[in-house]
Image (tube, rainbow, N blue to C red):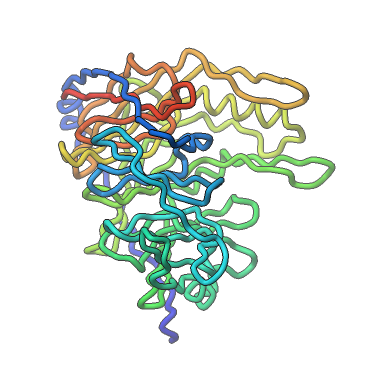
Amino acid sequence: MSKFGFFIILLLIVGCGSPEKRNLEQQRQLSFSLDTVLVDPGDEILYLRASLGYAELSADGRFLYNYNPTDHALEKIDLDELKFVEKIPFEKEGPQGTGSFNPFFLLGVDSILVAGSLKHAAIFNFKGEKLSEVTIQEVLDQSGILDGGNRFRINSVIPGSENRYFGFVTDWTAKSRQLIKVDVPDGTVTELALPAFDKLEEYHVTQFSGGQVSGFLVSQIMLQTEGESIVISNSVFNELYVYLPDSDSLILKTYESRLTPNQKTPYYPRQVDSDEAMERIRATGMAEINFERLIWDQVNARYYRFSYQADIETVEKDGWFSLSATNVRVYLTVFDKNLEMITESIVPQLTTIPRTYFVKDGAIWIFENMEDELGFLRLGIAL
């Protein structure tokens, strides 16, 4: 067999602890504080159009690196001092060119992986110099996993390694999504089966226009590698997978909320034929419970997860449809380092849906555009 082997990971399914234990732990109460901070940009106009969707936080939580596609540069922001530090330029073309920049991943304190194009994926230092190329495309081609037009996007660099990655393979319909691990040094592709997520297909909607496929509505699957575990979750169900690297296995954990439903209602039509119909379905999905990604609190050794419900209205203007959210209810669930649920609470201080956020110094920092200046709401949590 070629070294480009294809392996299936063993799947283990377990519960998340006894009901008695969960009920006891959920009696613990949460209290919150909220303040606002503003970053001093100096003479720089920071790129906020993507709401920090192109930003990465350093491992120590001090620096935020925000990609500015207009200037093809990273904006380095000191979160301890709350000020802009410098702009780090990169070349787009040529021997030192990055090509398409997103996604990018910080590697230690002095280098980054730029993987917008897998064919030209490479590691750069913060002087914009290419240190090495990454042959991930070669490994994927040899495995055959991209046959038939499938696509792959890196979602995370495996902690402790610069050349091992997690990501999702999707087909052209975005209906089939398979999590894989790519080991570039070994030249292997490992499939991580997520059978409990197969039921997400019930929420997949295809839009047609003039008899042709024009769009899709899919449920979000999220992967995060910070903290004690590698976690795969989704926006529809109150459950998640935990990857255990030592035993090369997956554990499915399911949870019971006292405050919200544990899943969306599966009544979605499989096909629609207008933008308005698609936006109405999207509005219905947002009005129901939505589970967000987990984030890791290094200071307190625990995980947090936002979820939310809202009243959603479909707004039409000049033939374009958008969604307007009112009466937003934001919840926070707290898990210990082993992903056991500790407690949950509504967060009365938050009245809008949190979109871009991270944990720093034991508080959740939530992006806030303050009259085109970079600001954060800082949510303090007492348990």
**In-image side of 211 versus 130 (left or right):** right
> If the image is split into quadrants, where does the C terminus sit?
top left
Q: Where is residue 164 in the image (x, y as percent from the top left)?
A: 36, 66
Tell me where residue 257 sits by quadrant. top left
Q: Where, quadrant-wise, is the N terminus in this rendering? A: bottom left
**Residue at 22% from the left image edge and 38% from the top image edge:** 297
Residue 34 seen: yes
Give the x, y percent position of residue 244: 26, 57
Q: Residue at x 41, y 26 (%)?
A: 368
Name the residue rendered at 52%, 65% in the picture.
97
Residue 369 placed where, x, y %? 45, 26
**Which of the 4 image quadrants contains residue 64?**
top left
Residue at the limit of the structure toward the bottom, as seen here: 1
Tell me if residue 142 comes above or below residue 115 in the rendering: below
5 lies above or below 362: below
At 51% from the left and 62% from the top, the residue drawn is 98
How many marks the image carries: the answer is 0
Residue in front for this viewpoint, 352 or 43 = 43
Residue 38 coordinates in the image, percent (x, y): 34, 25
Q: Can the viewer see residue 194 in this picture? A: no
Outermost residue on the right side: it is 210
Residue sitting nearer the eye, 355 or 24:
355
- Res 6 → quadrant: bottom left
